[in-house]
Amino acid sequence: MKTLTKRLLETEGSQNAEYVELDQLPEKVLQFGKGNFLRAFVDWQIHQLNKQHLFNGKVVIYQPSPHGQSKAFLEDQDFLYTVVLRGIENGKKVDTSEVISSVSRSLAYDQWSYALELASSEELELIVSNTTEAGITYVAEAPPNKEDIPKSFPTKLTMFLFERYQRLGEREAPGLTILPCELIEQNGTKLKEYTIKYARDWQLPESFIEWIKNKNTFCNTLVDRIVTGYPHDSIEEYRERLGYEDKGLTVGEPYHLFVIDGDEAVQRVFPLIAGRLNVKWGDITPYREIKVRLLNGPHTMMFSVGHLYGLKTVQEVMETEATRQFVEAAFREIKQVVRGDEQEKEAFIASVKERFLNPYNHHHLLDIGLNAVNKFKARLLPTLKRFVEEKEELPQSIVFSMASLFLYYKPIRREEDGLIGLSNGVEYKMKENDDVLSLVTQAWELYDKGGKLATVVSSLLEAEHVWGEDLSRLPGLQDAVTNDLQRMLEEGMSSSLEHLLNTCKRAE
């Protein structure tokens, strides 16, 4: 089958995908991350704006990690890819296909010097990123040489901004609008803080630090769209539907929400309202409170429980009685400590259940498991701690999900590119950062050599470099996780889940 290209679309067209040719537009956006989410969310929105002649700019994708980098990502497709949106919106079935043309080129990790060249562009206006919850962190790092690639996203951004400052007139250099999409609290505020901290660590000029503060706008954001990515299980159906091969094809739900805490200047740069896109401007706190705790929280909880139960997708979790009851218990538990109107919370939970049950998109649990420890830290740990503080007891479902998370990270062997686990007779690869992989390897090695399970749990909970604090200090947490984990190892997930659900029923 022929590959998606401009020539193919111009000569043969597409069977079922909308295509609008939008060439000769300046590169206005540098994007850190090539993942499905950014391409089906931010880049999709930029494409919608370009069609209406409201943004008139293209995106340069830079791949910030050496893991999984592709030097020719989308190049043989002229940087085109298809976004398919399927689901229910406003009570009506939606099933659309659209070729997205907002990307001008993509750069691999080791093409950092090409990304730096963009620093001198006066047409550049935006930086967007999604480097996972682990991406926006501060770890002391020596000043990089000009030819070096800084390790973390914040250090890359610091180097990029300094390059721009030097090339475009120092104090007079035009600043940028920076929209991090990582799902952590105060993502823009933290990214700005770390950028300034690295500038001070590297003894860069104070005038540069003032330029960061005064000329650049770091916005806190919240993003919401379930993107299931490349449809491996049903790719033949999509090839037949579209009439071409598309390695960048990504599938998502119709619903989208972008909340940006930005001023009128940011709104002028990124005119999402004018483009009739679902954007909210202002304080993201109330949106984040409900969305992260009641959508992302249960999502993260179900991934390891469902996988160890023998399921593959979110829909299977919601359609299997025991795991559906677990998700229901999670909603009831989390809702107790979520700020907001009770009716609004119930309405949001109902909408989330509908989205989880989307019959058109197969959201694989193992995809949700990418960087799952950092997701647990960002999405569930604050709820766990608030529950303990307000209820003076542990949230049983969240504790159970933590135990299942630890079991998911029990490796059977190490391969060159990561750790391999085993569940229900099927092997799987753990996708995590090196700190987490080293931690779980050391912890479970002790157990395999005859060590106590309580020691495994304590070593995992005490890892301040992973959690940002010593979780073993939370009253009763170590014993509760150990007990759940012991039962999972001895009786399996099905029996353990039944025990949890019975315990929850007795407590109600």
Image (tube, grey):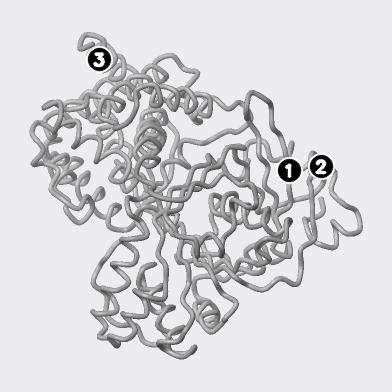
Mark 3 closeness class: few <14, some 14–19, many ≥20 residues within 10 Å: some
Q: CA distance from mark 1 to mark 2?
A: 7 Å
Please, what secondary structure does the residue beneath circle 1 have? strand
Q: Position of residue 107 (x, y in %)?
A: 57, 71
Q: Looking at the image, how many numbered discs can be counted on the residues? A: 3
Pick the residue in front: 100 or 34.
100
Residue at x 23% of width, y 79% of height? 201
Would you say the residues marked 1 and 2 are in contact, meaning their CB atoms lie under 8 Å apart? yes
Q: Amino acid at mark 2?
A: Asn
Relative placement, left or right, of 192 versus 385 is right
Q: Position of residue 464 (x, y in %)?
A: 16, 53
Disc 3: which residue = 504
Disc 2: which residue = 16
Q: Going from the N terminus, do you reach mark 1 or mark 3 first?
A: 1
Residue at the outermost right position: 11
Relative placement, left or right, of 7 versus 171 is right
Please, what secondary structure does the residue beneath circle 3 have? helix
Residue at x 40% of width, y 20% of height? 323
Q: Position of residue 136 (x, y in %)?
A: 34, 60
Pick the residue in front: 268 or 322.
268
Above or below, 88 relative to 41: above
Which of the labelled discs sits on residue 246, or is there none? none
Pick the residue in front: 412 or 37.
37
Relative placement, left or right, of 463 versus 172 is left
Please, what secondary structure does the residue beneath circle 2 have? loop
Q: Amino acid at mark 3?
A: Cys
Q: Going from the N terminus, do you reach mark 1 or mark 2 first?
A: 2
Disc 1: which residue = 97
Q: Amino acid at mark 1?
A: Ser
